[in-house]
Image (cartoon, rainbow, N blue to C red):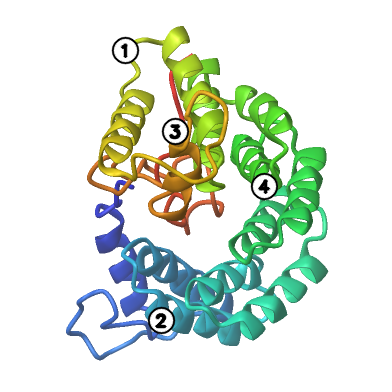
Amino acid sequence: MIRRFWLAPICLALACTSGCAGLLGSKSTESVDLPASQSAQACLATARELAHQGRDAEAIEMYQRARRFDPKTKGVARRLAVLYDKQANVEAAQHEFQLAFEESPRDAELWNDFGYYQYQHQRFQEAEQAFRKALELKPELSRAKINLGLALGEQRRYDESFETFRCVISESAARHNVGIMQLRHGEINAAELSLQNALAIEPKLAQPQNVLNWLNDQRAAGPAQSAHPQSGPGGVYATTLAATAPVPPNNVMPPMPATTCGYSAPVAAPPEPQALIRRFPQ
């Protein structure tokens, strides 16, 4: 994720006029009185920049300060819900989501964020419902489509997952993504076939080749025989690998930018699973 450092001077200037000094490196301790609504907006700008920098606790404090300046400021609850979830404060996150829905029940981005909150907590059916609601409200919301593909894949509905990914990314990338999710579930034979299909469509696509190479290395290092061989392309390896190392490590498959998945901007979550292709040229 590219951090927008050019915002820092603007946010800092706003902060210094609204009692938000010091949080972005300012040494000023003086403040200028502003109308409550302007002070709230200044704190919102500072909170967004703090969140971009990963300073979640300070961002939470600043969003709360914006709310104190002007309780009618919109969007605070949604951002707080995401930040609280990132800090594993489930009770606070649920409370803020409730407030956010009371404020904006037809906000597609909010439904996407709530769906990803459910996804992070492995409530995949509830996540699916939320993502579908987001797409009902805003069909072009690509982030919700990718997230829906993830939720379907976690339910092992791979055909539906593939078709959903395919609405946003290329066929080869979509097959790769499904292969990674099958690999996460220990379905090694199916994962290899999906990855091979991705390469058949796009031979120069590095990600599936890297994963297949890693699988071959695991096969070479794994047990040679099993008392209960499993039929199919992977042989006994399909049984043994899943119990030991079902997902390639980061040094084999570096994390991809979370540009089209996860929470809505500006608070983005790390990609999950890490080997997925989020965006691929058509």
User: In this view of the protein, can residue 273 be seen by the observer?
Assistant: no
Inspect the image, locate mark 3, and give the three-letter code of the amino acid beneath it. Ile
**Residue, x 27% and y 90% (percent of image)?**
30
Q: CA distance from mark 4 to mark 3?
A: 15 Å
Q: CA distance from mark 2 to mark 4?
A: 29 Å
**Residue placed under numbered mark 4 in the picture:** 151
- Disc 2 and disc 4 in contact, CB within 8 angstroms: no
Q: Residues within 10 Å of mark 3 (few under 14, many from 20)?
A: many
Q: CA distance from mark 1 to mark 3?
A: 14 Å
Which of the numbered marks, if any, corresponds to residue 277?
3
Q: Position of residue 196 (x, y in %)?
A: 45, 18
Asked whether 48 or 193 is in front, the reply is 193
Q: Position of residue 65 (x, y in %)?
A: 51, 85
- Disc 1 and disc 2 in contact, CB within 8 angstroms: no
**Residue, x 48% and y 31% (percent of image)?**
235
Q: Secondary structure at mark 3?
A: loop
**Residue, x 66% and y 36% (percent of image)?**
145
**Residue placed under numbered mark 2 in the picture:** 57
Q: Is residue 6 left or right of residue 153?
A: left
Q: Residues within 10 Å of mark 2 (few under 14, many from 20)?
A: some
Q: CA distance from mark 1 to mark 4?
A: 28 Å
**Residue, x 33% and y 47% (percent of image)?**
1
The residue lying furthest to the left in this view is 27
* Mark whose residue sits in front, 1 or 3: 1
**Residue placed under numbered mark 1 in the picture:** 204
Q: CA distance from mark 1 to mark 2?
A: 43 Å
Q: CA distance from mark 2 to mark 3?
A: 30 Å
Looking at marks 2 and 3 on the same chain, the residue that comes earlier in the sequence is marked by: 2
